[in-house]
Image: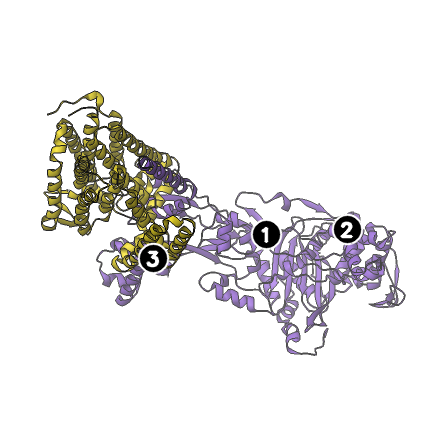
Chain colours: A purple, B yellow
């Protein structure tokens, strides 16, 4: 023991030292990051965020530079304070205050001395800056929205939150990220890739040169500019038509699937969501629970499609061969679809309707009957409904459409399982689901899906997934947005439907929407809808709906208009759609009387009804 | 002048030592390199150390040419001279970093406490190798303790806690030469109790002690008296440690302990050195960042890096492998001297060699332990590697005498 004590201590401590070195140098090396903070400074070079243009190369989103005057107290030298204060337009006491504040923060690290200096002031300061050691200018950039519209499409950018920093190694706190809309879905293209330079620093935080001769440095990759499919004139015009109405307009170029405009009403100025006022403005928008401006009705609103859905049922019936265009069906101001159940219709008693007449008069009896026939063609209602559902799905309904915007809803197209759940043990039949025949009942669609139906009919049977981006710098857009998707209906059946839709305007439900010189086609819809007030189901005024396209041959614009609680489709939706078509196709609107009627149309009382009156009348 | 028998010289130890000194020079160069104009002055550090190395070689050679009998004959005189030099500090000395430990003349400074180490080793060897000395007797114990205690007291007044610990470590030598186990037991017990008291507060330590005493009384009935004495002594010690720690120690001392023990994390204040050193090691990784390339070293983030914290430069620039290599060199060197001391027939040389290992080991243990964060921050250099004229020359003196004595192993006189 005595003789071996010293060698034992030597070996033991060396052993412990090596273990400790192993731990400190190879295992517990999180401190290396600290080291990088200490002796290596990472400086990012950010590419300017990409510009956004509309389809006609009109700039709609740019960037605006701000300048922050920075100060490093340790580097200050005696200065001519009089001149300095004059340049900055500040009092001498402010100057001293600010310098002391900066010193308190850190003597060697830069802190903001004056923030958000205007460009003109910056020009003057920059010229004289060399005289004032310790002061420097930091450039910062933010979005500048040149169009007071399309905020729902464009989205906005803001600083990344802690979760995003944790989840994504690219972002560091304080950096900006696309939050919604195009800014979000094209974030990677619009931001580019930041470059990194490493500098070595000493213990006084002075840069002593490039770290390891810059072997770890990376170059920035410039951002890409984006051309939207949006026509900004049409978008602004749509906004003006939607004043004092809640709802949505979706306009699509049928042959390309390009979304010409997507109007969400009520809308808001995208510039509200940039700069220092962002969070208060955001809260204001969020707290508007009646108008819900942040809720994109065009993409997220799931509504019953009403009579516009009759077109799809007509197409399916033709495809399933349960009717021919000349099949006539008797309507006695409605009909009994089962022993005791009667569905009303506005046809005069004793009217015989063929397909064409049924479309332009929007006959409930006709479409309920052919829907029932379509289902009952199969031995079981299950098979019938599932077959019907597959046809409907092929128009992009009942699921997310797949457009390039982060928001969306699938809508609802019921299948046999859905009814099995509500009516177990085969207790349901075609008659149970009869409301599907006239676009009521369980079916829910979003306005953009309705727009897509219009585009599909315009193309006589196919559509291209609607999308918002036309061009990304020199890259072409994804194949997904160039590929034709065919519906399960043969194209020959479409002509009959289109003819019916043409007659809707010519002699049917939407005669007020004719445009001289343009053959427009469409279908009105009026959808019953309900709301729960204090757990009581209450019916509200019907939604006013219209889908259509123009011109009839070689269509250039397909459109869906959805006006919440606007009552008849003819009353609001159809004229608005026709004005949009006229604006887009003729570049100007000649029907000033119709325009004035829409501009002055105000549905705000309708929207306030559920909040103000306990007993209110609807469909006035 | 005595004759030198070249074949009997411990060339291996000399090689290792030379290697350590060269590596030390390299790391001093790196940690004091100037890449900013205003720190050009730091080039002095390396050049100065180079001068010290040359001076050390002169000292080394000079020692080798002295006759063996010189060390025995003059050790008492040297000891007295050394004590006087320590006393004179209080009159002529200069205060550096809060310690009155330096003589300064014409830009050169000398730290007598460094030279007191080898000289005390010589004095102890002389006294203990005397035929009349027997460490089992109270008298010998008293005188040998006194030889160590006088410098401890003088250095304690300066104050220089690191050097005090080095002198305290002579107990290992005493133990080896025949000091009864009782002293060693008390010494080790005190050290353990000192730390446990600080960490766990006296309440729990006392409770544990009482429990231990009860167990001993119950199982070893023949040792009741001994157990009670130890128990009482240790309990009193625990209470006095608590008193000293809270009332005699200053806050800065307490902070240092608390940081190492982990009771406190203070990376900006007292813990700054340890933390920066930690970062340097971590950024070294397995192979290191390369000579002159350590970013922590270049940025001078580790204070005192060329002196006490030189090992962190090794860690950063040469990595885990480099640091381990240095540890191997020290371990091998110390084990080798210790082994050769065992083989030494001459008691004077034997005791002196033990002292050499003990002094090197204490520096090695505290310095590296401190730099890698296992031991509280105590200012003590790493032998042969750290910058510093006095400590380098004193260590070379220590080592040179060992080489001289070792080479005369079989000689009869």
Q: Mark 1 points at which residue?
A: A229
User: Toward the viewer: A380 or A77?
Assistant: A380
**Residue A111 marker:** 3
Local packing at callout 2 (Cα closer than 10 Å; few below 14, some 14-19, many 20+) is: many
Instruction: Identify the residue at image location x=65%, y=48%.
Output: A256
Q: Name the residue under label 2.
A: A391
Residue B62 image point, x, y percent: 13, 29
Q: Is residue B262 left or right of residue A532?
A: left
Local packing at callout 1 (Cα closer than 10 Å; few below 14, some 14-19, many 20+) is: many
* Cα–Cα span, label 3 and label 1: 43 Å
Residue B404 appears anywhere in the view:
yes
Q: Which of marks 3 and 2 is in front?
A: 3
Q: In this view, does B72 lie to the left or right of A432?
A: left
Residue A317 appears anywhere in the view:
no
User: Toward the viewer: B132 or B179?
Assistant: B132
Query: Is A293 above or below relative to A23?
Result: below
Which quadrant of the figure contains the C terminus of chain A?
bottom right
Residue A289 image point, x, y percent: 59, 69
Q: Quadrant of residue A428?
A: bottom right
Q: In this view, does A293 lie to the left or right of B248?
A: right
Instruction: Identify the residue at image location x=34%, y=34%.
Output: B322
Q: Do labels 2 and 1 share a chain?
A: yes
């Amino acid at each position: 023991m005595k003789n071996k004590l010293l060698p034992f201590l030597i070996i033991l401590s060396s052993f412990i030292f090596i273990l400790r070195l192993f731990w400190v140098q190879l295992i517990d090396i999180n401190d290396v990051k600290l080291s990088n903070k200490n002796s290596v400074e990472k400086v990012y070079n950010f590419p300017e965020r990409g510009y956004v243009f509309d389809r006609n190369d009109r700039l709609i989103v740019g960037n605006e530079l701000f300048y922050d005057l920075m100060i490093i107290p340790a580097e200050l030298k005696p200065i001519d304070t009089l001149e300095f204060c004059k340049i900055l337009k500040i009092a001498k006491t402010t100057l001293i205050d600010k310098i002391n504040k900066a010193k308190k923060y850190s003597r060697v690290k830069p802190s903001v001395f004056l923030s958000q200096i205007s460009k003109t002031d910056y020009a003057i300061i920059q010229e004289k800056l060399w005289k004032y050691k310790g002061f420097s200018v930091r450039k910062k950039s933010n979005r500048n929205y040149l169009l007071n519209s399309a905020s729902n499409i464009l989205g906005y950018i803001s600083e990344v939150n802690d979760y995003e920093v944790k989840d994504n190694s690219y972002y560091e706190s304080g950096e900006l990220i696309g939050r919604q809309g195009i800014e979000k879905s094209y974030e990677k293209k619009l931001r580019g890739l930041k470059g990194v330079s490493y500098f070595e620093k000493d213990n006084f935080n002075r840069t002593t040169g490039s770290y390891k001769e810059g072997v770890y440095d990376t170059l920035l990759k410039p951002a890409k500019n984006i051309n939207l499919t949006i026509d900004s004139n049409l978008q602004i015009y749509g906004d003006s038509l939607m004043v004092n109405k809640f709802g949505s307009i979706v306009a699509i170029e049928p042959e390309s699937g390009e979304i010409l405009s997507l109007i969400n009403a009520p809308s808001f100025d995208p510039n509200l969501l940039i700069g220092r006022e962002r969070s208060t403005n955001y809260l204001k928008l969020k707290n508007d629970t009646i108008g819900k401006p942040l809720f994109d009705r065009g993409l997220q609103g799931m509504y019953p499609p009403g009579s516009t859905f009759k077109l799809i049922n007509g197409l399916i019936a033709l495809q399933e061969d349960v009717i021919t265009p000349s099949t006539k069906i008797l309507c006695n101001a409605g009909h009994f679809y089962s022993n005791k159940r009667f569905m009303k219709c506005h046809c005069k008693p004793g009217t015989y309707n063929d397909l064409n007449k049924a479309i332009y008069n929007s006959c409930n009896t006709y479409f309920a009957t052919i829907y029932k026939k379509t289902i009952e063609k199969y031995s079981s209602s299950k098979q019938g409904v599932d077959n019907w559902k597959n046809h409907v799905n092929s128009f992009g309904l009942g699921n997310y459409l797949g457009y390039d915007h982060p928001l969306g809803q699938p809508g609802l197209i019921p299948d046999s399982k859905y009814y099995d759940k509500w009516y177990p043990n085969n207790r349901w039949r075609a008659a149970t689901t009869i409301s599907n025949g006239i676009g009521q009942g369980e079916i829910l669609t979003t306005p953009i899906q309705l727009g897509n139906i219009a585009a599909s009919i315009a193309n006589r049977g196919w559509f291209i997934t609607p999308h918002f981006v036309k061009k990304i710098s020199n890259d072409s857009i994804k194949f997904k947005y160039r590929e034709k998707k065919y519906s399960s209906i043969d194209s020959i059946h479409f002509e009959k439907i289109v003819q019916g839709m043409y007659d809707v305007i010519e002699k049917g439900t939407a005669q007020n929407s004719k445009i001289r010189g343009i053959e427009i086609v469409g279908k009105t819809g009026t959808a019953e809808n309900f709301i729960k007030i204090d757990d009581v189901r209450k019916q509200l005024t019907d939604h006013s709906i219209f889908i259509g396209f123009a011109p009839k041959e070689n269509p250039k614009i397909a459109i869906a208009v959805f006006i919440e609680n606007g009552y008849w489709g003819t009353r609001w939706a159809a004229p608005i759609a026709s004005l949009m078509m006229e604006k887009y196709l003729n570049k100007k609107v000649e029907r000033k009387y119709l325009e004035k009627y829409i501009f002055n149309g105000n549905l705000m009382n309708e929207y306030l009804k559920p909040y103000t009156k306990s007993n209110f009348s609807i469909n006035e | 002048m005595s004759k030198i028998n070249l074949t009997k010289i411990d060339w291996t130890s000399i090689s290792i030592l030379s290697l350590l000194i060269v590596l030390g020079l390299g790391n001093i160069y790196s940690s004091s390199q100037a890449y900013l104009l205003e720190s050009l002055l730091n080039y002095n550090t390396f050049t100065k150390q180079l001068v010290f190395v040359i001076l050390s070689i002169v000292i080394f050679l000079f020692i080798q040419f002295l006759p063996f009998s010189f060390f025995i004959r003059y050790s008492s005189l040297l000891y007295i001279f050394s004590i006087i030099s320590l006393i004179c500090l209080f009159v002529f000395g200069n205060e550096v970093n809060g310690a009155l430990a330096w003589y300064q003349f014409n830009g050169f400074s000398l730290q007598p406490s460094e030279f007191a180490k080898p000289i005390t080793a010589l004095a102890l060897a002389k006294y203990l190798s005397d035929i009349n000395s027997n460490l089992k007797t109270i008298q010998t114990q008293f005188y040998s303790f006194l030889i160590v205690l006088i410098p401890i007291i003088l250095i304690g007044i300066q104050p220089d806690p690191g050097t005090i610990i080095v002198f305290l470590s002579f107990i290992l030598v005493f133990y080896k030469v025949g000091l009864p186990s009782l002293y060693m037991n008390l010494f080790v017990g005190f050290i353990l109790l000192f730390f446990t008291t600080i960490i766990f507060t006296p309440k729990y330590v006392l409770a544990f002690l009482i429990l231990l005493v009860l167990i001993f009384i119950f199982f070893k009935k023949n040792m009741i008296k001994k157990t009670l004495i130890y128990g009482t002594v240790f309990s009193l010690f625990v209470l006095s440690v608590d008193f000293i720690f809270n009332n005699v120690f200053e806050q800065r001392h307490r902070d240092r302990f608390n940081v190492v023990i982990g009771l406190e994390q203070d990376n900006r204040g007292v813990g700054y050195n340890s933390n920066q050193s930690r970062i340097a090691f971590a950024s070294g990784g397995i192979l290191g960042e390369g000579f002159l390339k350590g970013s922590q070293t270049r940025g001078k983030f580790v204070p005192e890096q060329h002196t006490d914290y030189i090992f962190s430069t090794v860690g950063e620039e040469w990595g885990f492998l480099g640091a381990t290599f240095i540890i191997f060199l020290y371990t091998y060197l110390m084990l080798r001297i210790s082994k050769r001391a065992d083989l030494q027939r001459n008691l004077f040389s034997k005791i002196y060699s033990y002292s050499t290992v003990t002094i090197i080991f204490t520096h090695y243990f505290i310095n590296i332990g401190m730099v890698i964060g296992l031991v509280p921050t105590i200012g003590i250099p790493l032998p042969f590697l750290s910058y510093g004229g006095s400590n380098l020359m004193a260590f070379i003196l220590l080592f040179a005498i060992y080489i001289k004595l070792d080479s005369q192993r079989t000689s009869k006189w």
